[in-house]
Image (cartoon, rainbow, N blue to C red):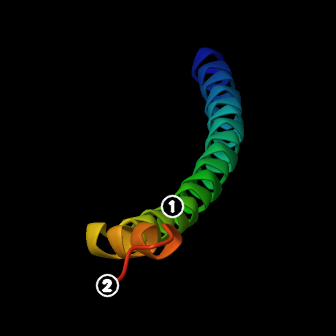
């Protein structure tokens, strides 16, 4: 009977320690996941801005507009 009581006490302490350690690990994993989520959101916002800038560059470097701009700079060429 005494052996059974000792076993249950040791098992209970072990389970409690396991739960505490698991909770601490999960807490730190949650902090890492939140940090990664913030980083991903920043990257997404930056990529949207970059995509808009590239679209503006494509629009501004349109061959027709570029040739017209060059022709307007060179003196003596009429359209």
Which quarter of the rendering shows the N terminus? top right
Q: Which mark is residue 50?
A: 1
Image coords of residue 3 (percent x, y): 61, 15
Q: Nearer the viewer, residue 62 or 38?
A: 62
Q: Within 10 Å of the Cα at label 2, are there few (<14), some (14-19), or many (20+) other Cα atoms?
A: few
Q: Nearer the viewer, residue 3 or 67?
A: 67
Which residue lies most toward the bottom here?
79
- Residue at coordinates 62% horizontally, 41% vertically from top-left? 29
Left or right of 53 on screen, residue 6: right
Q: Quadrant of residue 62?
A: bottom left
Viewer-nearest of discs 2 and 1: 2
* Above/below status of 34 relative to 71: above
* Above/below status of 14 relative to 62: above
Which quarter of the rendering shows the C terminus? bottom left
User: Which secondary structure, mark 2?
Assistant: loop
Q: Within 10 Å of the Cα at label 1, are there few (<14), some (14-19), or many (20+) other Cα atoms?
A: few
- Residue at coordinates 57% horizontally, 62% vertically from top-left? 41
Left or right of 72 on screen, residue 59: left
Of callouts 2 and 1, which one flags the residue occurring earlier in the amino acid sequence?
1
Q: Nearer the viewer, residue 46 or 72?
A: 72
For label 2, the residue is: 79
- Residue at coordinates 67% horizontally, 50% vertically from top-left? 35
Image coords of residue 56 (percent x, y): 45, 72
Image coords of residue 24 (percent x, y): 72, 39
Q: Nearer the viewer, residue 43 or 8?
A: 43
Image coords of residue 68 (percent x, y): 37, 76
- Kindly report the distance in space between the C-alpha atoms of the residues bearing marks 2 and 1: 35 Å
- Residue at coordinates 59% horizontally, 48% vertically from top-left? 36
């Amino acid at each position: 009977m005494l052996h059974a009581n000792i076993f249950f006490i040791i098992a209970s302490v072990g389970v409690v320690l396991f739960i505490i350690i698991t909770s601490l690990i999960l807490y730190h994993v949650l902090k890492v996941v939140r940090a990664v989520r913030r980083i991903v959101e920043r990257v997404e916002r930056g990529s949207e801005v970059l995509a808009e800038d590239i679209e503006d560059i494509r629009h501004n470097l349109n061959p027709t507009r570029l040739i017209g701009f060059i022709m307007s700079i060179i003196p003596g060429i009429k359209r």
